[in-house]
Amino acid sequence: MRNEELGGLEVWIDQDLCTGDGICAQYAPEVFELDIDGLAYVKSADDELLQAKGAVTPVPLALLTEVRDSAKECPGDCIHVRRVTDRVEVYGPDAE
């Protein structure tokens, strides 16, 4: 699936389920970062850590594979990747 076919993607992390394992930050450090609280957060396109609950950030097309793999490998099942257009989850614990 190409990003355009999905209508653009965005990603967010449920910190209540985050185990702080850091796999996401290893896969895609441009998108994910561990904060001093030991939990993972998404980052904005200009590299700012987004700490608000439910904060979302666009998935760069060049990093789609890394973000998808992060969602699949996350031990906390807390990474949600959804289409922007209809907010349907395509990768993560609520994906069909």
Image (cartoon, rainbow, N blue to C red):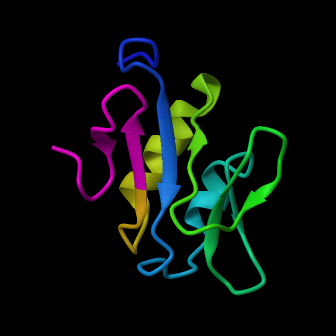
Q: Is residue 83 magenta?
A: yes
- Quadrant for the N terminus, please: top left
Relative to 17, does residue 92 appear above or below in the rendering? above
The image quadrant where one finds the C terminus is top left
Judged left or right of residue 96, residue 28 is right
* Residue 29 percent across, percent down from the top left: 72, 52
Q: Is residue 91 magenta?
A: yes
Location of residue 55 in the rendering, given as x and y in whole percent from the top left corner: 58, 57
Seen as rendered, the residue at the extreme left is 96
Q: How many numbered circles does the render carry?
A: 0
Q: In the figure, is residue 47 to the left or right of 53?
A: right
Residue at image coords 43%, 31%:
84
Instruction: Identify the residue at horizontal 41%, vertical 79% (top origin).
Output: 17
> Which residue occupies 45% across, 69% down?
14
x and y percentages locating residue 21 in the rendered image: 56, 77
Question: How far across and down, in percent of the image, does residue 42 sit?
Answer: 64, 56
Q: Which residues are magenta?
A: 80-96
Q: In which image quadrant can residue 79 be found? A: bottom left
The residue depicted at 30 percent of the width and 30 percent of the height is 86
Does residue 87 lie above or below 13 as drawn? above
Q: Does residue 11 sit above or below 1 in this rendering?
A: below
Q: Is residue 44 above or below residue 75?
A: above
* In the image: residue 44, left or right of residue 46: left
